[in-house]
Amino acid sequence: MIEYISQDTTRTYYVVFDTYRGARMFWHWFTGKEYAHCYLLTELSNNQTLVITPTPTECLIAEWPCTIDQSVNYLKSDATSILRYSCNYKSLKLYIPRGIISCVSVTKYFLGLKGFRSFTPCGLYKQLIKLGAVEYGKQKITNGTECGAASNDSSAHA
């Protein structure tokens, strides 16, 4: 379970959606090229940024010595999309993995999202937009398809 020491029960995350890098893996058949991975940024109280990057084998957590705005602006030109989403931690419960543990399932846990509405980063993107997430930065899609326009991710529908 995650416990936050501060009195604030609301935390703002920046969800970064990224293209796949390196060798093509089997899950890229489901994610597509532009929305192949997602990870989180959040601001710490000392003007530093916490970066949470779930990978297939581990969850990398780093502390960057810069503000959240500097971090997001640095990543903006390379990411497919960045959404700003605020979540309330009154409903955050003990983590019970259901299904495959992936970058999406870990990200959904940190955001306090439940259910099976999204399995891919593209599906998570659409779910967060429906929940009121604000687009912070979006790049032109290189293959000509927006997230969902040519996607077969039927689980992303609310």
Image (cartoon, grey):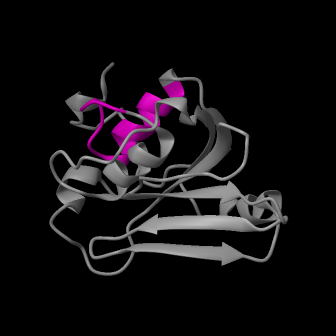
Q: How many labels does the image show?
A: 0
Any part of residue 146 in sight? no
Q: Is residue 73 visible?
A: yes
Q: Position of residue 157 (x, y in %)?
A: 30, 22
* Frontmost residue, 115 versus 120: 115
Name the residue at 24% across, 61% down: 28
Q: Residue furthest top?
A: 158
Task: Give the residue drawn at x 35%, y 37%.
Answer: 123
79 vs 143, nearest the viewer: 79
Q: In which quarter of the image is the C terminus?
A: top left
- Residue at position x 37%, y 42% in the image: 122
For this view, does 87 lie left or right of residue 91? right
Q: In this view, does 34 lie to the left or right of 24?
A: right
| Residue 15 falls inside the magenta stretch | no
Q: Is residue 109 above or below residue 67?
A: above
Q: Where does the image place residue 106, in percent across and percent down from the top left?
A: 37, 54
In the displayed structure image, the side of residue 90 where residue 123 appears, left or right: left
Q: Which of 1/81 is in front? A: 1
Quarter of image, res 118: top left
Is 120 part of what is drawn in magenta? yes
Q: Is residue 6 above or below residue 89?
A: below
Residue 152 in the image, given as x and y percentages of width and height: 21, 36
Q: What stretch is highlighted in magenta?
A: 114-129
Residue name at image x 41 percent, y 52 percent: 1
- Where does residue 4 sit, x and y in percent of width and height? 61, 51
